[in-house]
Amino acid sequence: EAENPPTQTQRPEPVNLIMIGMAGSGKTTLMQRMNAYLHERNDAPYVVNLDPAVAKLPFQANIDIRDTVDYKQVMSEYSLGPNGGILTSLNLFATKLDQVMEIVEKRAQSKRYFLYDTPGQIEIFTWSASGTIITNTLAASHPTVVVYVVDTPRSASPATFMSNMMYACSILYKTQLPFLVAFNKTDVVDDAFAREWMADFEAFQRALAAEEDETFMNSLMHSMCLVLDEFYTHLRAVGVSAMTGQGIPDLFAKIDDAVAEYHAEF
Ligand code: GDP
Ligand code: MG
């Protein structure tokens, strides 16, 4: 009598996704939408909240920094303002990161996607020692993709667009991780203008010159346009709406592309 071989459930390869973006760009809402999308496909992700100051989470987090640190208490204990309170809370959390990572690895044996939401204010995560430690620790554990969330309606002016893209560029060079720009809120403003500006830097320069004084379009701005043009050549970008779910399948397709490319390189 032939025996059935034991069914081997293949463990999907884990991928970390870190949501980064300006305050109000929609990191938390997009993460909720990605979470819902994966649940629908029976591919429930592992969800981590790293924002100690979020009042209400629209998703059920597997790990929540608020269970470890009370940021209001940290503020009063150390006589800090809100930003100092959030930063100190993140530092306190980072001191326990090894324990957190143990829990993540143990409890999530069968997960593919690990979603990490970060504090509302971008610089608290991107320009702090603890943010860097968390990012590097994740990157050392599994392929890690930065999902840079852009508030598309609020980036529709050329100067704002440029500063947001310069910020994205700086995070790419700082983290050196697979990187994806998610133009969010396409239900409000389509991301076609962004694609045009990224594809044709002369069109972007014309838009910039039309908006600003002649004097503003100086040689520094010209050089920055050239830097960004180089940045765009290798950039993965996708238009999404965290509100309606538009573009979410494409977002995951591009995430998987980024991971595949990462594997091809290393
Ligand atoms: P975070 O600070 O980056 O985490 O941003 P939130 O996720 O808290 O979102 C900030 C605001 O933008 C909230 O009022 C959201 O409802 C809104 N928002 C987020 N994503 C979208 C979107 O795709 N479309 C629209 N119309 N609003 C959005
Ligand atoms: Mg948030």
Image (cartoon, rainbow, N blue to C red):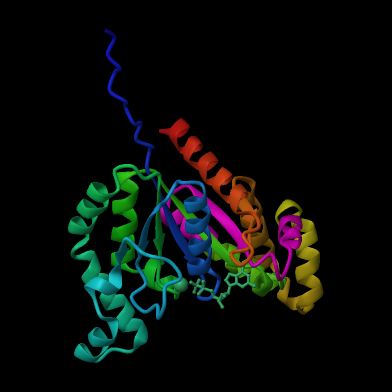
Q: Quadrant of the N terminus?
A: top left
Q: Position of residue 226 (x, y in %)?
A: 66, 55
Total numbered badges shown on the rendered structure:
0
* Nearest to the observer: residue 109 or residue 129: 109
Q: Position of residue 7 (x, y in %)?
A: 31, 25
Q: Residue at x 41, y 52 (%)?
A: 45
Q: Position of residue 111 (x, y in %)?
A: 36, 45
**Is 130 displayed left or right of 58 in the figure?**
left
Magenta stretch contains residue 178: yes
Residue 217, compared with residue 132, is above or below; it is: below
Displayed quadrant of residue 52: bottom left
Front in this rendered view, residue 230 or 37: 37
On screen, residue 179 versus residue 50, left or right, reads right
Kindly give the residue lying farthest to the front in the view shown. Answer: 1
**103 vs 8: above or below:** below
Residue 248 drawn at (x, y percent) = 59, 53
Q: Is residue 64 left or right of residue 55?
A: left
Residue at the image point whose x is 55% and y is 47% from the top? 252
Whether residue 109 is in magenta: the answer is: no
Q: Is residue 75 left or right of residue 214?
A: left
Residues drawn in magenta: 168-197
**55 lies above or below 18:** below
Q: Residue at x 57, y 56 (%)?
A: 181
Q: Ligand 1 shows up in which quadrant of the image?
A: bottom right
Looking at the figure, which quarter contains the C terminus? top left
